[in-house]
Image (cartoon, helix red, strand yellow):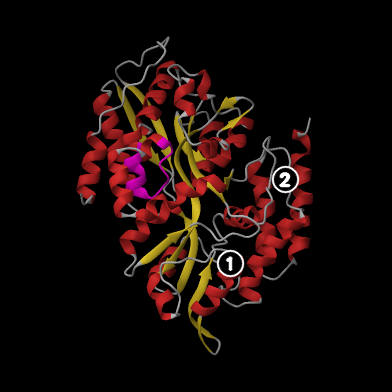
Amino acid sequence: MKLTRRTILGTLAATPLAASALRAPAVHAQAGTEIVFNYPVAVGGPITRLIDTLCTGFQQENPGIRVRPVYAGSYQDTLTKTLTALRGGEPPHVACLLSADMFTLIDEDAVLAWDDLPGVDRAWIAGFYPGFLENSQTGGKTWGIPFQRSTIVLYWNKDAFRAAGLNPDVAPANWAQQIEFAQRLTRREGTNVSQWGIQIPSSGFPYWLFQGLTTQNDVRLMNPEGTQVFYGDPKVAEALQYWMDLATRHRVHPPGIVEWGTTPRDFFEKKVAMMWTTTGNLTNVRTNASFPFGVGVLPAGRRPGSPTGGGNIYVFKAANPAQREAAVKFAKYLTTPERAAQWGIDTGYVAVTPAAWETQAMRTYVAGFPAAAVARDQLRDAVAELSTHDNQRVTKALNDNLEAALTGRKEAARAMQDAQTEADRLLRPFRR
């Protein structure tokens, strides 16, 4: 069956809420209960329209509850606006924020553990992919519910592969092949480059793209407790040197900082033949690429791997008892297998439960578009996204030094050691 946009949206709104056995809540949401839902618009595609459809469908099934979505820009914009509202005494009741923001929200005493909310049972939480729960749980509690989750994947232009004498259906399997393929794909006339072989964005989420390289070099950037980072590990500097060498030594990657937001457009305009970006761009690429494209797991270094990424649903302490109950109902509505599957189909994000991949809609979709399952399959080699206490500043220490290295102002090892020194200073108070 061909899944048109109209069919998708109609199905999304009409799918009934799956029944679940809930503990009897102490307080029932009354008519007129409203929950404010802060939501980021961070990638391409008709995301706001899809969220509006989900909110409308939920309200039709729960006429006593109104969900008011507030679209707040990027993830960073949404976090900033949410924390500003919190400090001003008017936080949202529910928000979709990065899974990596978990420790920040706990440190701000802003959010509630889902385990303590009425209607939440262990079976529901255990139904999510373990890889997504790594950035959702700490201290024996679940703080975020996986919703808009992703991994980094490799996209390539099959026509460009053919023109370079490469098999259009085979992606580079490892770091060495990635360089070899990129060399053959780079089109240069003197100093002018009309097509780069590869592009890895270094703005917006530089730490996240870099974590793909560090994971492949078999090193984690932080401990599970969020109190220590390993930026100074020699393997981290090696990963950074590989990234730097793509531009400076092999000359197959644009020099300097590569923009996150324009990388898909560069791909569509055939300015780059391979790109790393979120699987959340999958529908955007499928809609806008005028050429056949491939999607694959990231090439392996010492091992394969990618960080997970994307957003979790958080409930804020500002929510009153009726709003907390409503928030649980809303989160369960969003993550039923049918809706999680349809969300993945519509956006390219990874459907967050194995049950979603067993639905007929998802089975049909993957049969016709196997690339949709790449990010799910990569979960077996995925690690948690960088997340620590004082996460904004600890991450900024890394991002600033990545920029310094990628723009030629610091050597790789020095940049990572400087990032380590600053992170150690910031995290010292949390090591009790």
Residue 387 picture quarter: top right
Q: Distance between the Cα atoms at labels 1 and 2?
A: 24 Å
Q: Determine if the magenta segment contains residue 5.
A: no
Q: Residue at x 49, y 28 (%)?
A: 126
* Residue 284: x %, y % from top left: 36, 57
Find residue 229 and name its label: 2
Along the viewing direction, whichever of 75 and 219 lies nearer the viewer: 219
Residue range of the region highlighted in magenta in the rendering:
340-354
At mark 1, the secondary structure is loop
Amino acid type, residue under disc 2 in the picture: Val
Q: Residue at x 74, y 40 (%)?
A: 427
* Residue 364: x %, y % from top left: 28, 46
The answer to whether residue 141 is left or right of residue 408 is: left
Residue 282 picture quarter: bottom left
Q: Residue at x 60, y 27 (%)?
A: 109
* Residue under numbered circle 1: 257
Quadrant in which the C terminus is drawn = top right
Amino acid type, residue under disc 1 in the picture: Ile
Q: Earlier in the sequence, mark 1 or mark 2?
A: 2
Along the viewing direction, whichever of 257 and 193 lies nearer the viewer: 193
Quick one: label 1, few (<14), some, or many (20+) residues within 10 Å? some
Q: Nearer the viewer, mark 1 or mark 2?
A: 2
Find residue 301 and name its label: none
Along the viewing direction, whichever of 105 and 361 lies nearer the viewer: 361
Q: Is residue 380 visible?
A: yes
